[in-house]
Image (spheres, coloured by chain):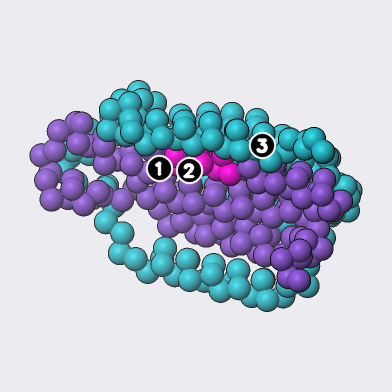
Amino acid sequence: MSLQNFLLLSAVLFSIGLYGALTRRNAVGVLMSIELMFNAVNVAAVAVSRYVTPAALRADPSATADAVVQHVLTGQVFTIFVIAVAAAEVALGLAIVIAVFRSRGTVDLTQVNLMKR
Amino acid sequence: MTAQDVMFWLLAGGSVGAAIAVVTVRSIFRAAILLAVCFMAIAGLFVLLNADFLAVVQVLIYVGAVSVLLAFASMLTRDAETGNAANSLRVPALLGAALFFVLLSSIALETDWVLMEGSLPAATLDRVHEVLSATPMWLAGLLLKEWVLPFEVASVLLLAALLGALVVVRERQP
């Protein structure tokens, strides 16, 4: 269990999500793949902030506890905001999917081509 | 191999297996359930990374809300049973995703990471471990002091998303 393990796991999850987002025909499936990618990024952010020395601490080894907290937990704070934005994104995304289904009777993304013509 | 290593490989295998199933399984409803399994495994990984609060948030928001919302949406739209088919881009998408994985993993492996164990003096390292042993408390202080403005903006964003979702799905009167 090291930083590299977590980053590789995150890369695997992100690539699976990327493949899913590119290939799913169902709009809900695409949203699921995007959520997978968000989670992969969260794992990477938390792992990096857990293991890597913050530059500010490297320059100043006599930092106070508050400075340590601020730099060591940055990844976790970022992840909280990513989760908040992802929640907003999935709520709006599903609302759009429902609206498309209501007006066109399908959520197959290959059939939703109104802007093509 | 310590117990933590065993847990890491179990959770990593579980999350990757569930993620692969999400993008390959035929039924979109099953994909939503498997997505919840994947999110649970990632919550376990957060615990291994000393991010207890994030693990709880992950279970509450992703497993409890996002997966359920996706399952509901898959049932509200048609073809829940067989609606998760792939489009004609399968091979190029697989190639692109594999290439992107090679890029990401080479970055992860080639970068000369400066790890905290080994580069910080013992006193600072002790403080870091002290912080990591009780992250919820320190996170609360950070969110309501240093990051209070983004914190409030996030609540406005959630309110706007809520109202936007209501407006988008509302039945229009003719």
C-alpha separation, residue under disc 3 versus residue under disc 1 = 29 Å
Mark 1 belongs to chain: A
**Is residue B159 in view?**
yes
Q: Is residue B137 above or below residue B6?
A: above
Residue kind at label 3, given as amino acid type = Val
Image coordinates of residue B56 in percent, x first then y, are: 53, 29
Q: Which mark is residue A78?
A: 1
Cβ–Cβ under 8 Å for marks 3 and 2: no
Note the chain letter of the cyan one: B
In the rendered view of the protein, which quadrant contains the C terminus of chain B? top right
Q: Residue at x 18, y 48 (%)?
A: A56
Q: Which mark is residue A82?
A: 2
The stretch in magenta equals A79-89
Mark 3 and mark 1 on one chain: no
Image coordinates of residue A23 in percent, x first then y, are: 72, 65
Name the quadrant containing residue A73: top left
Name chain A's colour.
Answer: purple
Cβ–Cβ under 8 Å for marks 3 and 1: no
Q: Which residue occupies the foreground of this view, A85 or B92?
A: A85
Q: Kindly state the secondary structure of the residue where label 3 is placed.
A: helix
Disc 3 crowd rating (10 Å Cα; few below 14, some 14-19, many 20+) is: few
Disc 2 crowd rating (10 Å Cα; few below 14, some 14-19, many 20+) is: some
Q: Main secondary structure of the magenta part?
A: helix
Cβ–Cβ under 8 Å for marks 1 and 2: yes
